[in-house]
Amino acid sequence: MFRALPVLDISRARRARLRPLARAALVLALGAVAALGQAPWGLWPLTVAALALAYGLWRRAEGWRAAGWLGWALGTGHFLLALHWITEPFMVDAARHGWMAPFALGGLAAGLALFWGAGLALARAAGGGAGAFIAAFGLAEAVRGWLFTGFPWAQPGHVLIDTGLLHWASFFGAPGLLVLVLAAAVALWHVIKGRRAGGAVALVVLAALWPLGAARTPEAGAAPDAPVVRLVQPNAPQHEKWDPDKVQLFYDRQRAFSAAGDVPPDLLVWPETAVPVLLERAAPTLEAISGAARGVPVVLGIQRTEGPRIYNSLAVVEAGGAVTAVYDKHHLVPFGEYMPFGDLLAQVGIYGLASNEGQGYSAGPGARLVEIAGLGRALPLICYEGVFARDLLAAPARPDFLLLITNDAWFGKVSGPYQHLAQARLRSAEMGLPMIRVANTGVSAMIDATGQVRARIPLGEAGWRDAPLPPPLPETVYARLGDAPMLALYLAALALSFWRNGRRARRI
């Protein structure tokens, strides 16, 4: 009997050591389940349920450090699944970059999760209430979208993009959708814990916003006389896009799509880096493209140089191949289109995934509008720029429509392209503006001013599609005010929580 006691003590000690590991594994799993609300899965109720359970665990965390570790584990699980597509660019040239893929995914997930960890630690330090949880989480996501050029991809609020609640983005933007998800999670936890009155009322109020949002969504369909835009999708896989034996094939495919049909459209749009010639050497090529387009204006992606600098650009080509406007991408992808300390790293053979020399692409001067005959003023966006609402809010004036060209072949065929499309829909809903979106491998789409897709070319298909351009809606609240109201709300809620916590401590 006495000999068994040490064994029992060891067993208890072992269980005590394993308990934190089991809790961490549970929180990691909850983060992954929360990611299933993102496109293309769209299982948003699982996101709410997982965050509700995570909120309950956070309330039981002892101190701000434990709350911070919980937030970090939750975020790591979430980003590991939501951003698993990030390994795809490294597989384009697997011999050169493949070894980096697991480190890139793990490092990115763990790094982005630090924002969630810091947010939940701050919320616990502020007193640990529901208001602090929502406000600090929202503030953490806002900082994630800005710091180090920002990466606001896969926010929990994005799970509502394909629901009737998307309309509320026209008032409060992506931060508003995030608050709705977190509020639903908190309310659900209270219902689960038996605090049915308050939680149930909160859930009913949130549920009522769904039909209310749909009822307040104005009609955004195109008029019978709306200009017609042709979306041109060549479907060039990234590992073949610049293959000397395939370049001509993809270029000829785009020209053939441009010349198809009995009635030419009012505008043709080719995707990002669609032309395999530098702009300054492309006069004969652009003239041939204009001929295939029967003189109709063509918007296309092309690279250009200026001295030692190279730009990822969009050009508007009119009849005869004349270039009437050029826009240079200004929000570049770190470690993709450019490398911090790129010239130094190039000496040891490390380059950006989309560049082969030193620093890679150079950034353009910023947001600008381009005039397109017969359609009005467009705000051009290239690929990654459609992820950032601030890049749209930085426009010098309100455009008539958004014009995004991209090459989503880098993102694979599982989740990345669909998540990118979802964020484009969110930008349209936020701004109350239609968007022409053309992607090399898809999904190309015509999106109306409420964020609904009116026409599309599926992922992984080559083809073209004519679609009328929907009209813009009146300027939205979000377009006028941006994120300022939500940021002020976050800070006010946190300040109130700290004040209440301080009063409570003084009473003790």
Image (spheres, rainbow, N blue to C red):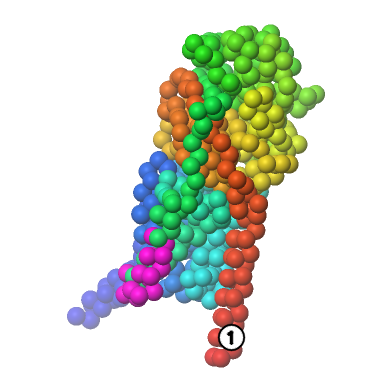
Magenta-colored stretch includes residue 89:
no
Q: Which residues are magenta?
A: 192-207
* Between 230 and 145, the one nearer to me in the picture: 230
Which residue is at 58% across, 70% downward?
493
Q: Residue at x 54, y 91 (%)?
A: 508
**Residue 285 in sight in this render:** no
In the displayed structure, would residue 9 be above or below residue 120? Answer: below
Q: Secondary structure at mark 1?
A: helix
- The quadrant where residue 267 appears: top right
Residue type pointed to by label 1 = Arg
Task: Answer with the quarter of the image where residue 391 lies.
Answer: top right
For disc 1, the marked residue is 503
Q: Residue at x 62, y 67 (%)?
A: 491
Dominant secondary structure of the residues highlighted in magenta in the image: helix
* Residue 205 drawn in magenta: yes
Q: Which residue is painted at 58% across and 21% down in the image?
A: 266
Q: Nearer the viewer, residue 74 or 373?
A: 373
Q: Position of residue 138 (x, y in %)?
A: 55, 60
Q: Residue 386: give x, y in percent of width and height.
A: 59, 39
- x%, y% of residue 332? 65, 37
Q: Is residue 33 left or right of residue 492?
A: left
Whether 264 is drawn above or below 457: the answer is above
In the displayed orientation, state which residue is furthest to the left. Answer: 1
| Residue 318 percent location from the top left of the image | 68, 17
Closer to the camera in the image, 149 or 255: 255
Q: Is residue 432 visible?
A: yes
Q: Is residue 305 left or right of residue 207?
A: right
